[in-house]
Amino acid sequence: MATPNGRRVAFSTSVVPKKTADTTSTVETLEDGSTVGVALYEDTILDTTIGKKFGGKGTVTIAANQLIQGWIEAGEVQDDIEGIEDQWQTVNTHWDEMVEITATDHTIRHDTEDCNFIYVKNTGSTEVRLILDGTEPDILIPAGASISTRLNNIAANLIKVDTESGSSTIEFVVAKA
Amino acid sequence: MALTVRYGSYCVPQEQVSDGGKFYIDGDAKTKMGGNNTYTISTSYTAPQITTSTVALSGSQNFVAIKALSIESGTVLISLDNGDTTPIKLLTGECFASKIASGAVAKIVISGAARVEYWSAA
């Protein structure tokens, strides 16, 4: 397929701090044995110290031609590999399956292009660690969680994932600037 | 009383067929993408603060939320190794929120005129 005229990624992050506590029961028993009032229950409210929901959104323009098919994995089978035969042969990557992440560092995108956006979701059950500088696993992504953020033009070969132990799977977008 | 943080990140890759045309969901993605999780605050957390200059968050924090409120000039970058590298960039209105490793030290690096709001939890 032809390269599109343009590409971009709309992204957002939301954070809701919550406080959960049991309420005080107001139940009283009347003379006839019946009860009135509200029984104890667990109530959740917006945390009063932080005091608000937190979040933001943005749109990052990425390269129209991402050069390789392996810049994105959305859990959808990707049958169309037209025009990327060389990469198919030289890069042993994941075209039609979820990526398995182990305790060994795994480079997500198999080239050295500068990248300005990343999204990683942990689709497995073991916490995944994201590395953005080639060495330090500073970002932790628990099961079901995801991260999406603009990058400061990071070379693709410095972006890696691993687990502390065990294995997991991810879906991802690592976009060339 | 339990303190938790429900957080999520989402993205929609899009492609434009022709110059000036509409953007559609990228054919390589085929879907909107996103995930969320609940982080349980174990010990302490801070109320939101606003900074206009570079600031390092406490090294004992395990969850950070940082939002660029406004950027009049310069850049807002985020380091997770106390400034050695700055891999994350925020533009106005963008937010970074994540669980971070116990050895990570989040630092907001501001050059120019910008207002950034942040809070963190252990």
Image: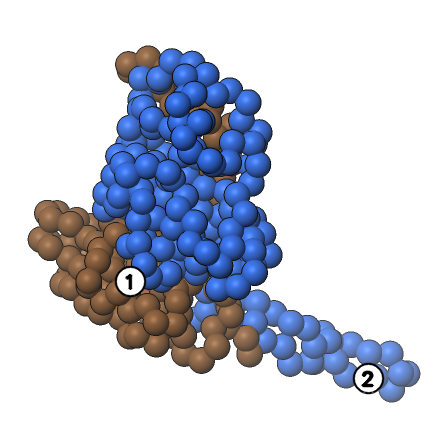
Please tell me in which quadrant of the rendered image residue B14 appears: top left
Q: Vertically, is A111 above or below A38?
A: above
Q: Quadrant of residue A8?
A: top left
Instruction: Report, in whole angstroms, how far the alpha carbon at label 1 lies from the one at label 2.
Output: 57 Å
Is residue A144 visible in the rendered image? The answer is no
On the image, the x and y values in percent for residue A104 come to 46, 56
* Residue furthest bottom as drawn: A31
Look at the numbered discs 1 and 2 and tell me whether their residues touch, using CB distance below 8 Å: no
Say which chain is blue: A
In front: A73, or B47?
A: A73
Q: Secondary structure at mark 2?
A: strand
* Residue A62 relative to residue A52: left or right: left
Tag 2 subunit: A
Mark 1 belongs to chain: B
Foreground residue among B8 and A98? A98
Task: Please tell me which residue is depicted at 58% across the width and 75% down the height of the picture.
Answer: A21
Which residue appears farthest toward the front when viewing the image? A90
Give amino acid for label 1: Leu
Which residue is tagged 1?
B80
Rendered image: mark on residue B115? none
Instruction: Give the residue displayed 36% in from the left and 55% down from the top.
Output: A131
Nearest the viewer among A101 and A14 is: A101
Residue A65: x %, y % from top left:
32, 24
The secondary element bearing badge 1 is classed as loop
Q: Is residue B46 left or right of residue A143?
A: left
Give x and y (percent) for residue B116.
23, 58
Colour assignment, chain B = brown
Give, as a three-letter code, the residue at label 2: Thr
Residue at image coords 54%, 47%: A100
Q: Residues within 10 Å of mark 1 (few under 14, many from 20)?
A: many
Query: Compared with residue A103, is residue A72 higher up or lower down, i.e. above or below?
Result: above
Q: Which residue is mark 2?
A: A29
